[in-house]
Amino acid sequence: MRYSPSVKILFLTVKPESPSAKWRVLQFIPHFRRAGVVCDVEEWPRSMLGRLGICKKGAAYDVVFLQKRLLPKLLANRLRKHAKSLVFEFDDVVMLKRTDEGAVRESPARERRFRRIVRIADAVVTTNEYLGELARRAGAPEERVKVFQSVIDLSRWPPRRREADRERVTIGWMGTPSNLPSMEIIRTPLVRLCRRFEGLEVRVVCEEPLSMEDVRLVNRPYAAGTEAEEVAGFDIAVAPLVEDPWTRGKVSTKVLAYFASALPVVASDVGANRLYIRDGDNGFLAGTLGDWEDRLARLVEDPGLRSAVGARARESAERDYSIESMVPRYLELFESLAARGR
């Protein structure tokens, strides 16, 4: 699908360095531009004056694409007034509030704002059926809810080429500081595995270091642009996650990155990971600490198994989760909204 250069879209994102902005907006922009879409990307302003101004600026575009922000009534109405067509996109249970201690709480204010924005948007785009149903229950018309799964630009994530080693094996995790506490889920299996296998190390790539006693731990600082290189240094990848009201709406983009890198993955047996992993085929799901130790031990001991599972993971990424498979769906949506707005 090819656009006229006159079609313009304003993307209002969360922080550009956040996974949501990277995976749900920024990686698509080069593809949209190649299709002829004029894309302007701006982070949602911090000041009220800036927010009022960006709402008015939306009038100059065919489509305004608002990512995750739950706006108060004044701003939601102002944005709706100026936007010819409005898309609201979210990839988390944005109505809930998470405390610094990790507790999940309901927020009546966020609930009200969520109901308002999904009802006034011309399209609501989200990542899975669980979140899609939340939008429908909040009043979004069925025909306006679009479930567009997260995908990956495979050109940025080449498959891992490192030679399999029986003696030295690296189990790796990469993520944000807010998700770093999830590694505590697998502390006991990692301690036991480090005792069993002398050449085993655990590598964590994050902006903050992890401390884990009795684990041969290597902390590496996260740096934008080096993600693929860091993940390529893993032999086995892990994706621990607790299932709660917050994580039920999550999409495990780190699993996609591991898949694209042709890595065998062991992940918590929760909904966010079941979307991608077929247990025993393109990865492993672990529901107990014993499961974690068993699956990781099998992969540590068997380089052939690591290679075979990693190859099937890459095949899954190529077949089901490539960015090329999703771009036409977005372009079709933008085409229909722009035509309606005119």
Image (cartoon, helix red, strand yellow):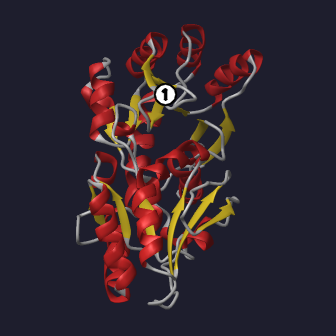
Residue 56, percent across and down?
67, 20
Residue beneath the point at 40% across and 42% down? 250
Residue 93 occupies quadrant: top left
- Between 7 and 178, the residue placed more toward the observer is 178
User: Looking at the picture, which amino acid does disc 1 mark?
Assistant: Ser
248 lies above or below 293: above
- Tell me if I can see residue 95 in this picture: no
Residue beneath the point at 36% across and 46% down? 148
- Tell me if I can see residue 248 in this picture: yes
- Between 316 and 328, the residue placed more toward the observer is 316
* Residue wearing tag 1: 85
Residue beneath the point at 36% across and 84% down? 301
56 lies above or below 289: above
Q: Secondary structure at mark 1?
A: loop
* 285 relative position to 83: left or right: left
Callout 1: 10 Å neighbours few (<14), some, many (20+)? many
Residue 31 occupies quadrant: bottom right
